[in-house]
């Protein structure tokens, strides 16, 4: 009985976790009508470390940073998201199949997910390093001073506002 309850909880959690991957067209732009709120908005959940909003950049810096972003874009963002979705789907299948769970296969799938997420994080941080190298010491100090402030608006999302009601709750 405990195994069934655990499997049900895991499947529910994985389904909720894999949801953002199913419709991710471009991790930098939310779907039309979507405010982009939530921890998974940036694809794998890693927000920018160097928040440049409000930082005075020269035209040269803007050009260089734009080039860094362009160069760091994945060639096929849908492929990575599809791969993650497929791995989560395989885990769901494993956990919803009657009988003992194939722990070896589960561990292998988990390792694949960890590897993809680690590679994504490394690429993301390398982009941040390149941006860091374009900024002046004063700009870096300004960013550091604002680092403890919660982000106010990301893609039109008010981070301090309560989340919207679930669909169908607008009658209340």
Image: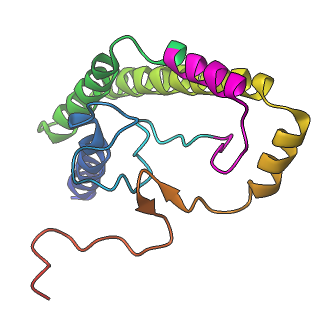
Q: How many marks?
A: 0
Is 39 a magenta residue?
A: no
Q: Is residue 101 visible?
A: no
In percent of width and height, residue 56 lies at 73, 43
For the point 74% across and 60% down, the residue is 148
For the point 20% across and 53% down, the residue is 4
Eyeballing the image, is 96 above or below 152?
above
The quarter of the displayed image where residue 5 is located: bottom left
Q: Quadrant of the N terminus?
A: bottom left
Q: Is residue 35 visible?
A: yes
For the point 29% across and 17% down, the residue is 79
Q: Quadrant of the C terminus?
A: bottom left
Q: Which one is nearer the viewer's eye here, 5 or 165? A: 165
In percent of width and height, residue 104 lies at 36, 22
The quarter of the displayed image where residue 101 is located: top left
Q: Which one is nearer the viewer's eye here, 82 or 51? A: 51
In percent of width and height, residue 61 lies at 71, 26
In percent of width and height, residue 99 lies at 15, 36
Q: Farthest residue in the right direction?
A: 137
Its colouring scheme is rainbow
Q: Which one is nearer the viewer's eye here, 106 or 140? A: 140
Eyeballing the image, is 80 above or below 128?
above
Question: Is residue 109 left or right of 123 when viewed as pictured?
Answer: left
Question: Is residue 138 left or right of 31 when viewed as pictured?
Answer: right
For the point 50% across and 72% down, the residue is 160
Eyeballing the image, is 163 above or below 170?
above
Q: Farthest residue in the bottom direction?
A: 172
Is 58 a magenta residue?
A: yes
Range drawn in magenta: 49-70
């Amino acid at each position: 009985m405990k195994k069934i309850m655990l499997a049900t909880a895991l499947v529910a959690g994985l389904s909720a976790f894999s949801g953002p991957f199913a419709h991710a067209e471009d991790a930098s732009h939310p779907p039309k009508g979507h405010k982009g709120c939530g921890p998974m908005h940036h694809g794998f959940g890693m927000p920018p470390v160097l928040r440049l909003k409000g930082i005075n950049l020269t035209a040269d810096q803007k050009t260089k940073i734009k080039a860094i972003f362009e160069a760091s874009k994945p060639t096929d963002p849908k492929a990575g998201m599809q791969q993650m979705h497929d791995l989560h789907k395989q885990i769901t299948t494993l956990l919803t199949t009657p009988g003992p769970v194939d722990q070896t296969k589960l561990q292998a799938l988990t390792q694949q997910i960890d590897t993809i997420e680690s590679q994504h994080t490394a690429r993301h941080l390398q982009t941040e390093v390149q941006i860091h190298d374009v900024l002046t010491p004063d700009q870096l100090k300004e960013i550091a001073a604002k680092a403890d402030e919660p982000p106010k608006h990301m893609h039109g999302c008010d981070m301090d506002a309560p989340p919207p009601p679930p669909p169908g709750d607008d009658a209340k």
